[in-house]
Amino acid sequence: MIIFLTALNKMGKVHEFACGLGSLEANFDFLNSIVSEGNSLLTVYMLEGTRRTDLPLTLFDGLPFSQTIRELKQEWEAILNKPVYAHIASFHQETMAALTCQRIHQYEVKIASHKRMIDYFTQWLQRTQGGHSSGPVREKLIYQYQSTIDRYQKQLIQMQFHSTLATNRLNELQA
């Protein structure tokens, strides 16, 4: 890697340089030392093989880079040394708890809906049973209402069971 730069010195004279100090940090420290001495950078670019990268001049404010880079490196190495599964497990547990809460809410809505439907069909069943007419139409309506009520009650029992399971699972996740 080679750094090419054009600088304006304190006297107003333009100088062009090229250097390759080995590491990126060393090159950046060199550029910052030029700025710290009162010179102004006009252009800076880095050449790696055939690839040119223009560097923003505001990057170089006269303060050394290497110490900041070392501190940043220590931070990301510390983060990388932490077990990944701990972060994933925590995220997984939070996500599972949120999804379980949503599922419980869905069961509550369905349970309330089924109870309303059972009440609705029970009223129609009672009206039909208490009616004064008789015959096959009445018997068929009574059978249909009772079958519908039975079906909703079975589904209600299943939803209450699953809601209880989901609530127990949420309690486990939150413990």
Image (tube, helix red, strand yellow):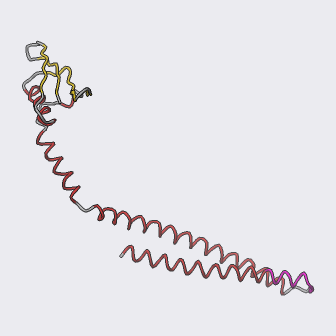
Taking depth in this image into account, of 62 and 80 the one nearest to the observer is: 80
Query: For the N terminus, which image quadrant?
Result: top left
**Rendering quarter of residue 148:** bottom right
Of residues 86 and 48, the one drawn nearer to the viewer in this rendering? 48
- Asked if residue 100 is positioned above or below residue 135 in the image, the reply reads above
Q: Residue at 70%, 75% (x, y): give it.
A: 117
> Residue placed at 14% from the left, 21% from the top?
40
Residue 127 spot, x, y in % from top left? 82, 82
**Residue 63 seen in the figure:** no
Range of the magenta residues?
133-144
- Residue 134 as seen in the image, left or right of residue 66: right
Seen from the viewer's position, the closer of residues 150 and 50 is 50
Q: Quadrant of residue 59?
A: top left
- Residue 70: x %, y % from top left: 13, 45
Residue 86, image quadrant? bottom left
Res 119 seen here = yes
x%, y% of residue 63?
Answer: 11, 34
Q: Quadrant of the C terminus?
A: bottom left
In the picture provided, is 170 more to the left or to the right than 136? left
Q: Position of residue 90 (x, y in %)?
A: 33, 65
- The reply to whether the magenta stretch includes residue 13 is no
What's the residue at 15%, 30% (across, down)?
A: 61
Q: Which secondary structure type mostly characterizes the magenta part of the structure?
A: helix
Count of numbered circles in the view: 0
Is 175 rendered above or below residue 5? below
Q: Along the horizontal axis of the image, is 8 left or right of 147?
A: left
